[in-house]
Amino acid sequence: MIEIPVSFCRTLEQWTLEGGNLEQQLAEFRQHTISTESEVHSICHSLDALHNHAELLSALDQHPLPLLAHYFRGVVDPGLQQTIINEGLPVLRWFVADALAGKPHQDHDLMIVLEVLAQYRQKEDVSWIYKAILHPIAPNDPQWFAILATYRDSHPYLKPFVQALAKHLPPGRACLAFLKLCDHIAETKQYQSHAFNGLVGIEKLKSYLHPQSNRPQEFARAAVRTAALLEQANREILLSLADQHPEPAIAFLASVTRAALGDAQEAESLVERCRDVRRSYETQLKLKEIGMDSLIPEEALRPEFLPLAQTSHWLEFQSELHRAPDRLALLETRDLFWLPRHQQCRLYLVKYEYDQPVGEKGITSGVAVVGSVTHSLIGETDVTMDAADVLGLHCCWELEALHDPLAPRNRTAKMGRNLLRKHNPNF
């Protein structure tokens, strides 16, 4: 064990002197966790050299900074953590200060640095992270979710950080990350009021729901989710905007939110929605999510209905067509030993139809298989094919998706039928 830290330090020393591709030089240490103060000192020395002579040590397309900062993660020894706090974090702060001063930097590299600083929960770094998120550094980088998640639960500087940022909200997805943090605080009742209850917060959430907003739908969804945690007056403002949103999915989320808060009329509308085969499965999933699955009517769970609902949901939300069909019908039901799952399965073949051609292939009809992995081989199977051929192709497709060694090299109906026949003599 002693040899590994020594070798690690020597590798860093050589890179500091000669430069080169650090990723290649540290290849054997990718899974290494530092365990000695000597390693911390070597990393700090390398970071110092990088800060002062980056152009001499590394090419522009290389990223030594996150490689070095990474080794400060995952350290559990209290003594070593303190060494990192005393010697490592001050060096990392240089890179943040440079970026905020307008010096050239790589956003992704800096996000790793900020995450490491956040992990150690030091008072000085609260200020650096606050400045970085408002600067803004990479406002749409998903790493902000991980960085702000470090403030959850017993963070010593949570309250001043949230209070300050609530007055000057960050742009982009960084604001969604902050919103998620504030939602968690409200859900766990750490503070009496949600940070977005103020005027600044409400205006930001209203902008997410504006019908002419060019933001991705995730912003509107986040606003509706937060509405349930706000004061009643603010909640109604947001839900009313969601009701009028041009995307039906947002109005649907508003209905779910009201039902979860005890609105009997909205709950009944969701029951009726469950009876609509084209919208049923999405509604069932949401009712389960909010703990109201007891509202799902019995007829929506029957075997002649549920596979159709699952097909419609898959076509709209998971397929290349992105549209629920106009009509669905159950073609056939088979009980088979299903090779991809190595167990008996009840499989349903569902026909779907569109009044107008959809997708690049101009699809007007097709057949889906439900019961294992809901899917339709669009353009490969159709309603005129024999059921055994459809099931055979679907079996091959599932085996391929699982990287199962039984998957044939070339997917054909005949190959699939033969595979199924070995375990289902009457197939």
Image: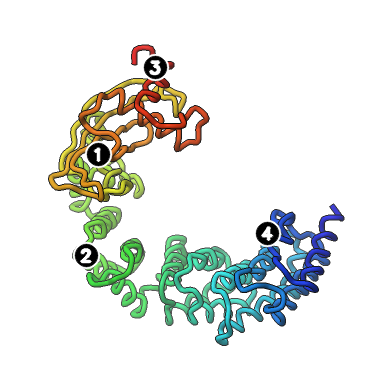
Three-letter code for the amino acid on which mark 4 is drawn? Gly
Task: Note whether 204 is above or below 316 in the view shown.
Answer: below
Which comes sooner in the sequence, label 1 or label 2?
A: 2
- The alpha-carbon separation of the residues under discs 2 and 4 comes to 44 Å
Going by the numbered disc 2, the residue's amino acid type is His
Is the C terminus in the top left, top right, bottom left or bottom right quadrant? Answer: top left
Q: Nearer the viewer, mark 2 or mark 3?
A: 3
Q: Earlier in the sequence, mark 3 or mark 1?
A: 1
Proximity of marks 2 and 3: CB atoms separated by less than 8 Å: no
Q: CA distance from mark 3 to mark 4?
A: 52 Å
Q: Which residue is mark 1?
A: 309
Name the foreground residue: 395 vs 135. 395
Pick whichever, 219 or 45, lies toward us.
45
Residue drawn 23% across and 72% down?
212
Indicate which disc, 3 or 4, sits on the residue closer to the N terminus. 4
Q: Position of residue 416 (x, y in %)?
A: 39, 25
Q: Secondary structure under badge 1? A: helix
Image quadrant in which you'd find residue 419: top left
Q: Label 2 belongs to which residue?
A: 245
Identified by mark 1, the residue type is: Ala
- Colour style of the rendered protein structure: rainbow
Q: Which residue is mark 4?
A: 74
How far is mark 2 from mark 3, CA to CA? 51 Å
Q: Earlier in the sequence, mark 2 or mark 3?
A: 2
